[in-house]
Image (spheres, rainbow, N blue to C red):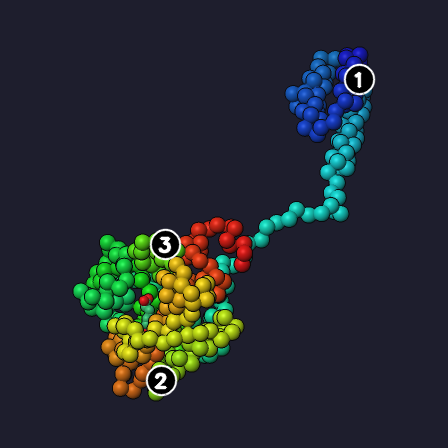
Amino acid sequence: MQNRLQKLKQEIFDKLAEIKHLDVLRDLEVKYLGRKGEFTKILRCLKDLTIQEKKEIGKLANEIKKDLQEKFEEVKNVITKNVIKREKLDVTLPGEKIEKGHLHPITIIQNELEDLFISMGFMVLDGPELESDYYNFEALNIPKHHPARDMQDTFYIDKKNKKQEYDLVMRTHTSPVQVRAMQKYGAPLRCVVPGKVFRNEALDACHEHTFYQLEGLMIDENISISNLIAVMKKLLNGIFKKEMETRVRPGYFPFVEPGIELDIKCAICNGKGCPSCKNSGWLELFPAGMVHPNVLIAGNIDPKKYSGFAFGLGLTRLIMMKYGINDIRLFNSGDLRFLEQF
Ligand code: DAH
């Protein structure tokens, strides 16, 4: 029995000398010292011995067990220290470069414009992209079957609004928020509405199905078209940081009377004519006008007391002008070669 114990001790010590991994050490500990382990098995046989033998061998067995436990602990400490040594971090090594994203060019300009309008006392508002036929057309003085509906190629949705009164459309412009804002805030009112709009366009360098507009609306007593032109000029200077050549033409939009188009000289070809300006040298940038009395009435505002102007800035187009981008499809392309330039 004594021999068996001594032999086992030596066997375990030999094995421990070769161990380099903690999990192997743990397995070994279970194999020999665990409840069903070899060492425990031997101790169980003690019960068959005489009292004298039990005394002697029991003492020896306890000593060996203690030695083994201490040896296991010692090996464990050595392995742990080695692991820590191996895993030491060199904090002086250069870090890995993490690529940072940045704002989309449309967001950059939108933020700039919001700041500019806030400085002139305008609120920045939002509106639903899935809009009812009522706000998108009817409240803007474009009744059903009015030919002006053909000016905007509309994505109709085959569902109606909650009250089942009106068809739903993907909003074709940001103008529906005009009436929503009037109903919510009343007059006087100054707001801009940047946002995404949708049209069923045949795609080319200057037409996209999804693009951005910025609607502007100002209502108060005695507002005239000169207020409109002043605000537009201020806006253009703010964006281009230089005097832009502009021209004003009459324009037709059912929700304004009179309606105008403010064009800027095409910055891509400098007025010579190119695909972006349909070879005209000019770009329609600001359709605008004095808010039609029917629209004020839809917004619960008294047209005898108040007047206002509205404009619908083509945000995407404006950015194309500012940076000389010649294809509108680049904005939604997700092409990093394009996006990383901003
Ligand atoms: N909503 C029009 C469009 O997308 C643009 C527009 C024209 C907006 C005149 C206005 C406006 O506010 O007064 O075609």
Name the residue beneath numbered marker 1: 10
Mark 3–mark 2 Cα distance, whole angstroms, equals 39 Å
Q: Earlier in the sequence, mark 1 or mark 2?
A: 1
Q: Answer with the quadrant where ligand 1 appears in the image.
A: bottom left
Query: What residue is shown with label 2?
Result: 223
Residue displayed at 36% across by 54% down: 204
Identify the residue shown where x is 25% and y is 72%.
Answer: 254
Secondary structure beneath dot 1 equals helix
Amino acid at the residue labelled 3: Asp
Dot 1 crowding, Cα within 10 Å, few <14, some 14–19, many 20+: few
Quadrant of the rendering where the N terminus is positioned: top right
Amino acid type, label 1:
Gln
Asked if residue 187 shows in the view, the reply is no
Placement of 40 over or under 303, stated as above or below: above
Q: For label 3, count other residues whose C-alpha is less than 10 Å away and answer few (under 14), some (14-19) or many (20+).
A: few
- The mark closer to the camera, 3 or 2, is 3
User: Under tag 2, what secondary structure?
Assistant: loop
Does the residue at mark 3 contact the one at mark 1 (Cβ under 8 Å)? Answer: no
Location of residue 57 (image quadrant)? top right
> Ligand 1: does it lie within 8 Å of the C-beta at label 2?
no
Q: Nearer the viewer, residue 326 or 237?
A: 326
Tag 3 residue:
204
Of 49 and 324, nearer the camera is 324
